[in-house]
C-alpha cells in the first residue's frame, strides 16, 4: 500500500527579512498540486501571515519548534497553545539542528511531543544518525533510541496524523543525499518500530518522510521506495521552482504509478 505523499518545507531561519513575498509566490505556484499534501514551516514571525495567506488554499502550515510549558515566565519561548490559537496545524519536533545547537535531547523531545499532542497539533518528529554514528555501524541503534525516547508514554489514541521524518544528520545541507536503498532501510525499521509499539495498521498508515538534501533530481528515486512517503525539505523549499518540482515528482508517481 502506498500512502498519500506529503511534501513539507522547513524554511529554518529563512528568508532574512519579511517572508510575505515568498509565501505569496508559494501560494501562486503550488495551488495546482492537488494529489499530494503540502506543508510549509516558516519561522514563527511569519506563521500568522502564512495562515492568512493560505486560507482557502491547499498549503497547510507548521511551526519549527515549541516549548513544552503552556505559559509563564519563559522569556523567548512559544507554547503549543499559542501555535494552535493562530491556526498552526503541524509542528516539527526534534530537528537535529535543535538537538545540536539548542540542547534538545530525547527527553525534551518527548516533552515537546506531549505538549503538541495535548494542544491538538500534529507533530513531525525528526530523527537520524550523525556521520560518525553511520560510520560506526550504529544507525539502527541510534534511530531506535531516538524513536523510543520521543514516544515514551504516548499512546496510540493521542497520535492523530503524526509523521516521522528520517533525517540523517550528514545529509542535511551538505548535498549528500542518502541513497534511496539506504534511506528505505531506515524507513522500514521505523515502520517496524511503529508496528511493535502500536499496531500494524497504525504503522501502515503513518507517513514517514525523508529529509536531507532532497532536490528535484533525486526526489523521484527516493519517493519510489515503498516506505518513503514524502520529504521534509530545507534548502530546496526556499525556491518555488525547486519546491514545486519536488512536489510534482510525488504527484507524478501518484497519478502514474500507484493505484
Ligand atoms: P536540506 O534539505 O537543506 O538538506 O535540509 C533538510 C532539513 O533539515 C529539513 O528539515
Image (spheres, helix red, strand yellow):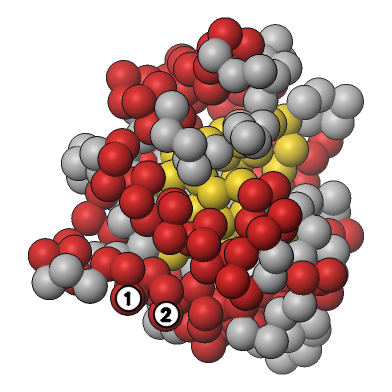
Q: Position of residue 60 (x, y in %)?
A: 74, 38
- Residue at (88, 60) in percent of width and height: 85
Residue that carries the numbered disc 2 in the rendered image: 145
174 vs 246, left or right, is left
Q: Quadrant of the N terminus?
A: top right
Q: Secondary structure at mark 1?
A: helix
Report crowding for label 2: few under 14, some 14 to 19, many 20 or more residues within 10 A (C-alpha): few
Disc 2 element:
helix
Q: CA distance from mark 1 to mark 2?
A: 6 Å
Residue most toward the bottom? 73
Residue 69 falls left or right of residue 255: right
Tell whether circle 1 marks a residue whose Cβ is less than 8 angstroms from ligand 1. Answer: no
Determine the image quadrant of residue 57. top right
- Residue closer to the observer: 214 or 12: 214
Residue 19 percent location from the top left of the image: 58, 36
- In which quadrant will I find the C terminus? top right
Q: Which residue is mark 1?
A: 141
The residue at 61%/64% (across/down) is 195
Query: Residue 38: percent from the left, percent from the top?
Result: 65, 32
Q: Are marks 1 and 2 in contact (CB under 8 Å)?
A: yes
Classify 139 as above or below 172.
below
Position of 192 relative to 213 (above/below): below
Q: Nearer the viewer, residue 256 or 77?
A: 256
Determine if residue 13 is in view: no
Q: What is the x, y in percent for residue 49?
A: 75, 40
Which residue is rendered at x = 20% and y = 41% of the image? 176
Q: Is residue 97 left or right of residue 53?
A: left
Amino acid at each position: 500500500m502506498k500512502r498519500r505523499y506529503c511534501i513539507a518545507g522547513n524554511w529554518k531561519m529563512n528568508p532574512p527579512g519579511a517572508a510575505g513575498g515568498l509565501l505569496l509566490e508559494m501560494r501562486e505556484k503550488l495551488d495546482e498540486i492537488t494529489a499530494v499534501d503540502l506543508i510549509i514551516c516558516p519561522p514563527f514571525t511569519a506563521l500568522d501571515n502564512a495562515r492568512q495567506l493560505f486560507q482557502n488554499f491547499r498549503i497547510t502550515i507548521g511551526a519549527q519548534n515549541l516549548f513544552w510549558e503552556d505559559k509563564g515566565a519563559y522569556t523567548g519561548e512559544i507554547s503549543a497553545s499559542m501555535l494552535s490559537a493562530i491556526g498552526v496545524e503541524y509542528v516539527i519536533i526534534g530537528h537535529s539542528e535543535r538537538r545540536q545547537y539548542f540542547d534538545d535531547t530525547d527527553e525534551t523531545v518527548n516533552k515537546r511531543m506531549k505538549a503538541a499532542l495535548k494542544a491538538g497539533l500534529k507533530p513531525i518528529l525528526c530523527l537520524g544518525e550523525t556521520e560518525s554514528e553511520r560510520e560506526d555501524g550504529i544507525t539502527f541503534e541510534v534511530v531506535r533510541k531516538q524513536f523510543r525516547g520521543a514516544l515514551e508514554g504516548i499512546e496510540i489514541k493521542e497520535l492523530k496524523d503524526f509523521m516521522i521524518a528520517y533525517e540523517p544528520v550528514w545529509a542535511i545541507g551538505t548535498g549528500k543525499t542518502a541513497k534511496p536503498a539506504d534511506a528505505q532501510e531506515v524507513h522500514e525499521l521505523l515502520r517496524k518500530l511503529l508496528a511493535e509499539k502500536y499496531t500494524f495498521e497504525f504503522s501502515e498508515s503513518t507517513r514517514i518522510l525523508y529529509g536531507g538534501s532532497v532536490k528535484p533530481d533525486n526526489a523521484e528515486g527516493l519517493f519510489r521506495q515503498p516506505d518513503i512517503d514524502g520529504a521534509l525539505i530545507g534548502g530546496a523549499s526556499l525556491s518555488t521552482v525547486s519546491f514545486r518540482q519536488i512536489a510534482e515528482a510525488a504527484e507524478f508517481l501518484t497519478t502514474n504509478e500507484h493505484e
